[in-house]
Image (cartoon, grey):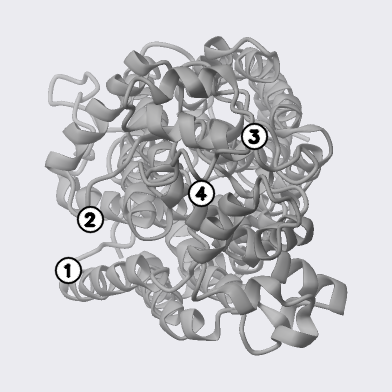
Amino acid sequence: MIAPTQPSQSRSGTKSTSLFRTADGKNYAFVFTMVTLLFLLWGVCNGMIDILNKHFQDSLQINKMQSAFVQFANYMGYFFMAIPSGILARRYGYKGAILIGLFLVALGAFWFIPATHIGTYWSFLLGLFILATGLTCLETVANPYATLLGPPESGTVRINFAQSGNGVGWMIGPVLGGMFVLSSTGVANTSNADLYKPYLIIGIIVTLLFLAFLVSNVPDLQNIEETKVAGPVTAATAVKPLFKRWHFILAIAAQFFYVAAQTGVFSYFVNYISSDTPVLTQSGAKTFSGLGRGLDVILPGPPCGMTYPAAMLSAGDITDVSAFVAKLQNDSDAKTRPVSDYLWSQFSTNQMFLAAPSFVALAGQINAPYADKVSAADLDADIIQKKKDILVQGLNQVFQSSAFFADQRFAGVVLPDNARQLIGQNPNGEQLIRLNRGLFESVYPADQIKRSPYLQAAVYRITDQGAGRLLSFGAFGLFLLGRFTGSFALRRFKAHLMLALYGVLSLISMVLVMAPLGWISVGGLFASFFFMSIMYPTIFSLGIHGLGEQTKRASSFIVMAIVGGAIMPLFMGWLADQWGMRFGFFMPLLCFAIIALYGLSWKVLEAHDSKVA
C-alpha cells in the first residue's frame, strides 16, 4: 500500500510548485494522465446525451418533459450506483473500481445495438442506465483520486485540470452523436436506425481503455486530514462524525442543485437554439455556413448544414392533416384542383398511408413505439405525426423545385404581390423556397396550413445539427475555457468565493435567457456555460475538504447528489411544455441562487466543523 500523501516541500523547506510530486519524491503525472482520460470518457458520453432530448422528441413524438426521462435514466444510474461504487473502491482499491466501471460502460454502449432493433423508448433508456452505472464507478473514484496525485494543498487545482478533460469530452459528444441522429436540414430526423453507431464507437474505445488500465501500475493512495483554515487538525476533529460536518452535508445539496441546473441547461440547449434564437439575415446565415464549412474540414463525416431557409415547412405548420390530405386527394374547387392534383402525385408511394383514416387501417405500416402506448388515441397520434413527417419532407422537396409554378396550373389562383414579384426574378435557392411557399399558402386555407411570417425577406434558421455544433464548439468551448482559466484562478483566490461569484453570474445569465432580448438572451445562454465550468469540481473539493479516511465514503454521497439531474429536468421540461422553452430556464435560475449561497457560507460552515463537538 502506498503511504498517505503529505504536503510536498522542497529541500529548502518551501512548498513545491509541482502538481504531481509528493513529499516522498514520487511523481504521479502519468497516472494523472490516465485518470484524465476517464474524465474525457464520461464527458463524451454525457455530451452525447444532451442531443438525445431533441432527437427523441422528433423520432418518438414525445414532449419535452417526456424527453427528460433520458436524463432520469442516466442520473438514476448514478444514484443507485453511488454507494456501491464507494464500497467497491474501499474493497478493491482505485484500480479495481476503475476496471469495474469501464466494464459497465462498455456493456451499456454495446447494448445500443440490440436496442436499435427493439426500437422502443425503454430499450434506449436501459442502455443509458447501464452506461451510467459504469460512469458512476469511474467518477466516484476519479474525483478523489485526482486530488491525491500530488500535494494536498493543490488538490482543487488538480481536480479542475482533470475536469478540463471532461470539458473536452463534452465538446466531442454532441458532434459524435449529432453526426448520426441530428438533422442537417429543416426537416427533423425521425429515425433511430443509426443511433447505435456512436455508442458502438464508444464501446470499442472503452474496451481498449480497459486493457490499458489492466496492465498499468495504478497505486492505491490514501488521504490524511488536511490542515484546516481555522487551525491545526486535532484528534477530536479527525473522528467527528461525517454527518455532523455541515460543509459536507450542504455540499451534497449544492451538488444536487448544480447537476440539476447543468443538466437542464445542457439538455435543452438544442431546443432553445431551434425555437428561441432570432432568425438570421442572409449575411448571418453566410457566417454560420462558413463556420460549418470550416468545421467540416477538420471533422469526419458528411458536411453539416448549419442553416435552412425559415420559409421551409415544418410539421407544426400543418394544422389539420385530415382536411389537408382530403383536399389534396379530391379537391372540389376547380380553381385549385390542378395544384392539388400535382402535389398529390408527388406522394405516389405513400398515398394509401396518407389517406387511411386511423390506426386500425394501418396497424402494420408505421414504425412506432407501440409498447410504450396505452390507447388507440395515442396510436392515432403517432399516425398523424408520421403523416406530417411524410408531407413535410415531400412538400419541402417541391418548394425547392422550379417545376411547381406553371401558368396553367395556377391560372385560377389569385397570387400574392410578393409572389408575382419573385416570379419575374427567376428565383433560385432561398428565394425559390419563399416563392413556392407563398404560392402554396395561396391555395390552402389557414385552418389547414399555418401562415409563414418569413416570406417578405431572406431569413434563415439554425438546423438541429448546427445547434449541436454550436453546443460542442461554442457552449462547451466556453465551458472548457472556464475550466482552464478557473484552474489558474483557484490558485490565487479562495475556492468558496469563486464558487459564490460564478453562482451569481450564472443566475444573471439565466435572467437574460428568460428575457425576450434576442441575441442578448442567446449570449446569456452561452455565458452560463463558462460560469458553470468550475462548479462541480469545486463543490466536490469543498465538500470532501478535511475528511481524511472518510473521503471515499463522502465522495459516494456527493456523487449520489447527481440524482438532481434525474429529477429537476423533468420539472424544467414541464415548464417548457406549459409556457415555452424560455420560461423553462427558471429552474436552473433557482439552482444557481442556492449554489451561490453555499459558496458564501462555506467559510463559516467549515470553521464550525473544525471545532470539537
Q: Position of residue 581 (x, y in %)?
A: 70, 33
Callout 3: 10 Å neighbours few (<14), some, many (20+)?
some
Of the numbered discs 3 and 1, the one sitting upstream in the chain is: 1
Q: Is residue 357 above or below residue 185?
A: below
Say which label, 3 or 4, has the lower sequence index.
4
Residue 314, image quadrant: top right
The x, y position of residue 161, in whole percent, is 31, 35
Callout 1 crowding tier (Cα within 10 Å): few <14, some 14–19, many ≥20: few
Q: Quadrant of the N terminus?
A: bottom left
Residue designated by label 3: 442
Closer mark to the observer between disc 1 and disc 4: 4
Q: For residue 50, which numbered disc appears in the image? A: 4
- Can residue 550 be spotted in the picture? no
Answer yes or no: do the residues labelled 1 and 2 have beta carbons within 8 Å? Answer: yes
Q: Amino acid at mark 4?
A: Asp
Circle nearer the viewer, 3 or 2: 3
Q: Horizontal placement of 384 versus 129: left or right?
A: right
Circles 3, 2 touching at the beta carbon (< 8 Å): no
Q: Amino acid at mark 1?
A: Ser
Q: Nearer the viewer, mark 2 or mark 4?
A: 4
Neighbour class for label 4 at 10 Å: few (<14), some, many (≥20)?
A: many
The answer to whether marks 2 and 4 mark residues whose Cβ atoms lie closer than 8 Å is: no
CA gap, disc 3 to disc 1?
70 Å
